[in-house]
Each structure stands twice: as C-alpha cells, then as structure tokens.
Image (spheres, rainbow, N blue to C red):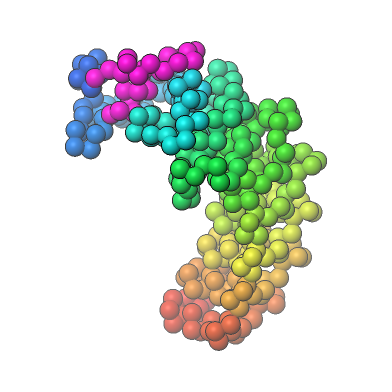
Amino acid sequence: MDELCHALVVELGSADFNADNVPSMPTLVSCCQGLITVDKEASTVRLIHFSLHEYLSSHPDIVDRPHSAVAEICLTYLNSRQIRAFSTAPSPDMENTCFLQYCSVYWGVHAKRELSDCPRSLALKLLLKEHYDLISTILLLGHARLDLGDRDNCPPFSGLHCASFFGIVEVVATLIEAGCYDINKQGFWGCTPLSWAAYNGHEEVVEILLRWRKVNPDKADDDGQTPLFFAARNGHEGVVKMLRGRKEVNPGKPDNFGQTPLSIAAESGHEGLVEIVLGREEVHPDKPDNTGRAALSHSALKGHEGVVKILLGWGGVNPDRPDKFGRTLLLYDSWNPIVVRV
C-alpha cells in the first residue's frame, strides 16, 4: 500500500518528492470507485475481481505505454533531490523511503519493455550520478547478501553494468558510444557488462557489446567463469551461439573449480547447448573437474537422459571414468537410474 501511495505522489519532471502529499488509502480506494480492494493484514492492494484483470489484459490500449510510464515514475523518484540526499547518509533508514526498493530493482524491467524519450534521458541521468551506488546496491540485494551499512566496501556496479544487467539496448549503446565506461571493467563478483548480459540472456545487448573492438568476450570473473559459462548455465542458447562463434572465446576453459561451459550445461540438462559447445575443437568432453567428475557424470547424477545419450555418442567419452572418490557412472546410476535405459 505504501509503495503505491508514494508512486502516485511522484510529479513527472519535478526534482523534488513531497511526502506530505501522500494520499490515504481510503482516499485512493474512493478515487478508484470500487475497482480495487485492500488486504490490510498483508498491506497490499489488488483489483476487486480477476475478471477486471482479464479485461485490462485484453485491452492494453486503455493505458498508453504503461511500462514506459512506470519507468518514468521510478526514474523521476530515483533522480529526486530527496533520494540523492538520502543516498549520502551514513546509515540510511529504508523504512522512510518505501518506494526506493521497488524503483531500484524494477525500473530497468519496465524500461526494457518500453522506453520513450523522457525515461531514456532520466535513465542516463541516473546511471551517471554518484548516488547510483546505493541504488545499485539495493538492486544487487536480490542476487547476493550485501550489507547496506557497509557500502564503502561494496564492489562497483557501474551504469553500464546495470544497463547490461537489465538488457536496455538503447541505454547500453549510448553509454558505450559516449565512452563513459570501460567496456571490460570488472564490478561486482568480478563480472563485466558482457557477463551480466550473458547471465540474463539479453541477446541484443550481447551483440552490441561484441561489436566493439576493445571488448574481451572471454574475460573471467572472480570464480574464473566467463560470459559463455553464464549463458550455458542459464540455458541462453542464442547467447551461447554468439559467444561460441568468437575465436577469442575458449569454450573449454575451466573455472576455478575445474568446471567448463560444457559440464555446467550438461549438469543443467541443456541438450541444445551441449551440442553447440561440443562443436569446438578446444572442448574435451571427458575433461574432469576438481572433483574428478566429467560432463557425463554431472548429467547422469542430475538425471538428464538426453544429455547422457549425446555425450555417450561422442568420441572420447569414458563411461567408466571414476571421480576422485572412486565413484563411477554405475554408482551415479544407482542414485538416479537412467544410464541402463540409455
């Protein structure tokens, strides 16, 4: 309820946020003429009936460019004087800025769906501001355990990292062309902008980043994992194809744990990706990781029958190879019986 009320107070084009104008929930419900209801115990607002949701979903033209509108509201709030001042506070009180978390985490989701001129300008303004450090930290809270009270020691997460994370093509292109950031800069977890784009499967952003001569498409993060590794783990076949086609990318390069893009794709059960990665000569399908397990044992343990068939049909794969604990494929089969069927 509080997030919605604060969102309604944002004045587009204003550099200030006046919390004194936040409406009461009875006022808001009255203005909506009975179309919304409030769950006081959960402190949430919802439409009065699922049929209203169906109607709105089937008539998207009722609201003009809704995602762009919400993105503009979020970005106006994040660029406000109050949030800039709040961001420099040594111990910020998150309870007094209830709309900050939603804006920080989701503005890019809306902007990726629709982006008109005004929110695009606001996005660029935000990503070049010093107070973006706090906003990026809140965004990363959804992906790692960070302490807001220790922001000085938080790893960097630049505007280009953020735009690549969300997959906002126009903003990424503008930031690169303006030369605002090092395209290979390592930020949080040691990830580059390309790593974040690959991680989330943003093919258009990956394509833009790969066009630049200075980009290193095989740069590893703190764990030795490259953009190809991220794309393979999350099943982003289009991104894997783009990266696999670059001669600078070594699809057989192991991370700090000895796993390769092939073994992680096999462990995740991505049959199409396994076949794509196997096509490069640098890939050794029977290469063991630090535990002595190869791609075949990873896929068998997880019960991925299709992947097991692909690997067994590939030359150089030894189904009797033991890991460092002496466990073989037959033992994995006793845990997850697919090998006999194969």
Give the total number of marks visible in the rendering. Answer: 0
Q: Is residue 5 above or below residue 229?
A: above
Please tell me in which quadrant of the rendered image residue 66 appears: top left
Residue 185 image offset from top left, x and y in percent:
69, 43
The residue positioned 47% from the left and 80% from the top of the image is 333
Residue 203 drawn in magenta: no
Question: Quarter of the image holding residue 293?
Answer: bottom right
Q: Pinpoint residue 259: horizontal percent, then vertical percent.
A: 62, 67
- Stretch in magenta: 1-24
Does any portion of residue 138 appear in the rendered image? yes
Q: Residue furthest front?
A: 90
Quadrant of the drawing holding the N terminus: top left
Using the rendered image of the protein, determine whether residue 48 is visible from the camera's viewpoint: no
Query: Residue 57, image x and y in percent?
Result: 36, 28
- The residue under the point 67% across, 65% down is 254
Q: Please state if 25 lies on the left or on the right of 293 as rendered.
A: left
For the point 33% across and 26% down, the residue is: 4
Residue at left offset 50%, top offset 34%: 135
| 280 lies left or right of 192 | right
Residue 255 position (above or below residue 226):
below
Pinpoint residue 114: horizontal percent, then vertical percent: 52, 26
Front-lying residue, 156 or 293: 156
In this rendered view, identify the residue nearer to me: 26 or 50. 26
From this view, report whether residue 91 is shown above or below residue 125: below
Front-most of 290 and 317?
Answer: 290
Against 217, residue 73 (above or below) is above
